[in-house]
Amino acid sequence: MPADLLREVWGFDGFRPGQGEIVEAVAGGRDVLAIMPTGGGKSLCYQLPALMRDGVTVVISPLIALMRDQVRSLREAGVAAGALTSGNTDAETDAVLDGLREGTLKILYMAPERLASGATVPLLKRAGVTAIAVDEAHCVSQWGHDFRPDYLRVGELRRALGVPLAAFTATADAETRDDIVARLFDGRAPQSFLRGFDRPNIHLAFQPKDGPRRQIMDYAAARRGQSGIIYCATRAKTETLQAALNAAGIPAVAYHGGMEAEARRAVEARFQREDGLVVTATVAFGMGIDKPDIRWVAHADLPKSIESYYQEIGRAGRDGAPAETLTLYGPDDIRLRRSQVDEGLAPADRKEADHARLNALLGLAEATACRRQHLLAYFGETAEPCGNCDLCDTPPETFDATQPVRMALSAILRTGEWFGQGHIIDVLTGTATDKVTQRGHDRLPTFGVGKDTPRPQWQAILRQMLGRDLIRPDPERHGGLRITAAAHPVLRGGENITLRRDLIARARPATVVRTQVDDEDAPLLSALKAKRRALAEAQRVPAYVIFPDRTLIE
Ligand code: ADP
Ligand code: MG
Ligand code: ZN
């Protein structure tokens, strides 16, 4: 019977992986926690059971726009569905209330804010609600960035109605799962489904940054005419990148949390409807989009964790057709993400967990064999090499890097764990800069031990060491590199290290332009930024503002 409904109402030939069992459990009145990847088809797992059960199913969902879309398509398929949201007209609300009173409504969508009103629970009781479904259930957890305090009321709703609850999310990590169980199910274990994390149609690729502006522009230009998202670490970058894309004749719009709600909705609507638009966005661009034919997702900067990475690339190819992704990363990203964790207000154990999630992503970035295998292993699934990732396409050349890694570790130790990558490489390559000679580092036994290895190769080695969490920038020492516990076995000679030999393609000389800002009225920073923009536009290369203390502004 579910198969008939699936065909008649949705026009689908069969279930996607995992859907069948979840539908059965939800229809059977079990408490359910289902974790499925974005695009896995979660909506169906509560909509179909709602049609199989007597009474009304209430669906708690965080976004009005998504609710309206879903109600519209359910109605078009002949399903009695409605929504109570602040966006309703009075007539819409009346129709929904009538449907509830007459017992004709099957699916009622509701924003969690609605539960704050004392009238809601009695209304739902009278209406004969027989099940609750919670979409984007990770919003109940303070752990992630989508926390919505009103989701905490859903637990109260379940207690008041005494009906089964099914929670759905794409966020797979253990802490979020525990929060959901504690807050929605009062700690009583629901039947859990953790299924089908593979999205085989999505091609996975990472590249170290090497002229990142050019890398991203080339990537977007090669995919002209296809809808894509470029995720950026900062609001400012979404705007500069958008301008650069438009200048190159690629239609693009920026999206970030600093924009007015109305402007953001306009971008969402335009992206939904237009083909070939590129959105340059911060992570604020996410839950509100339900576009099945996004053909590519690029990360101009490293995401903050493996979970964020997976969720963000998962927005590509929801229609199942081939889609592509590219993630750029470099030592600056690693430093930025580390310091975001270190400087955050979270308690120490949570900071450690955040470092671990970042490490998992860096491990994926520096993987030496099939990325999908590596990614799925993180989510607890085993798989064969996929044939649809950059490392399957071109297996990387690896080498036993134990010796150079030990050299670098010892240079870091001998200089007192106070210095950044540039200085360490100066010491290793025997480059007697002023800083090196002033500190007497040219007299260290490690001075020049690595002079046969070219500088870009050292950069790649140190980046991979950061990625393996053998070394970390220390926030207490202005980002000076220090050695982690993971490096001890390597130093002691108990562990060998294999690294990728991918050189940074070619070292390009930087042009240094010293500039005088003479207009005393102009704020220094904005004057410098304007100068940088002008240079970047004139020379069509990335340009940076570097202050004497080495602060870098793109
Ligand atoms: P999620 O909420 O898990 O991200 P959705 O419920 O939005 O995913 O579904 C993603 C897409 O997959 C939608 O376009 C939906 O119509 C489609 N879909 C879901 N289940 C099936 C199925 N069994 N067969 C074919 N398409 C499906
Ligand atoms: Mg969904
Ligand atoms: Zn692969």
Image (spheres, rainbow, N blue to C red):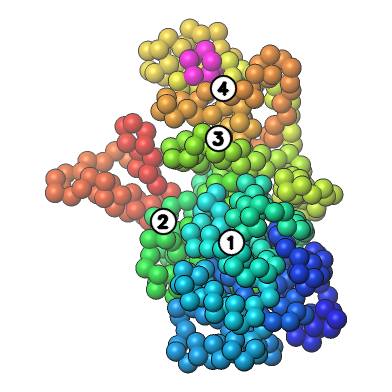
Check contact, mark 2 vs mark 3: CB within 8 A: no
Magenta-tinted stretch? 411-417
The numbered mark, 3 or 4, whose residue comes first in the sequence reads 3
Dot 2: element: helix
The quadrant of the rendering that contains the N terminus is: bottom right
Mark 1 → mark 4, Cα distance in angstroms? 45 Å
Instruction: Identify which residue is drawn at 44% across, 58% down.
Output: 238
Decide: few, some or many residues near mark 2? Use Cα within 10 Å; few <14, some 14-19, many ≥20.
some
The numbered mark, 1 or 4, whose residue comes first in the sequence reads 1
Foreground pick, 162 / 337: 162
Q: Which mark is residue 235?
A: 2
Q: Which mark is residue 155?
A: 1
Q: Can you say whether 42 is above or below 477 in the image?
A: below
Location of mark 4 (residue): 483
Instruction: Identify which residue is drawn at 73% across, 21% down.
Output: 495
Check contact, mark 1 vs mark 3: CB within 8 A: no
Q: Nearer the viewer, mark 1 or mark 3?
A: 1
Q: Amino acid at mark 1?
A: Gly
Q: Nearer the viewer, mark 3 or mark 4?
A: 3
Q: Nearer the viewer, mark 2 or mark 1?
A: 1
Mark 3 → mark 4, Cα distance in angstroms? 20 Å
Q: Amino acid at mark 4?
A: Ile
Foreground pick, 239 / 310: 310
Mark 1 → mark 3, Cα distance in angstroms? 27 Å
Q: Position of residue 358 (x, y in %)?
A: 59, 41
The numbered mark, 2 or 1, whose residue comes first in the sequence reads 1
Q: Is residue 516 visible?
A: yes
Q: Amino acid at mark 2?
A: Arg
Q: Position of residue 488 (x, y in %)?
A: 65, 18
Location of mark 3 (residue): 349
Decide: few, some or many residues near mark 3? Use Cα within 10 Å; few <14, some 14-19, many ≥20.
few
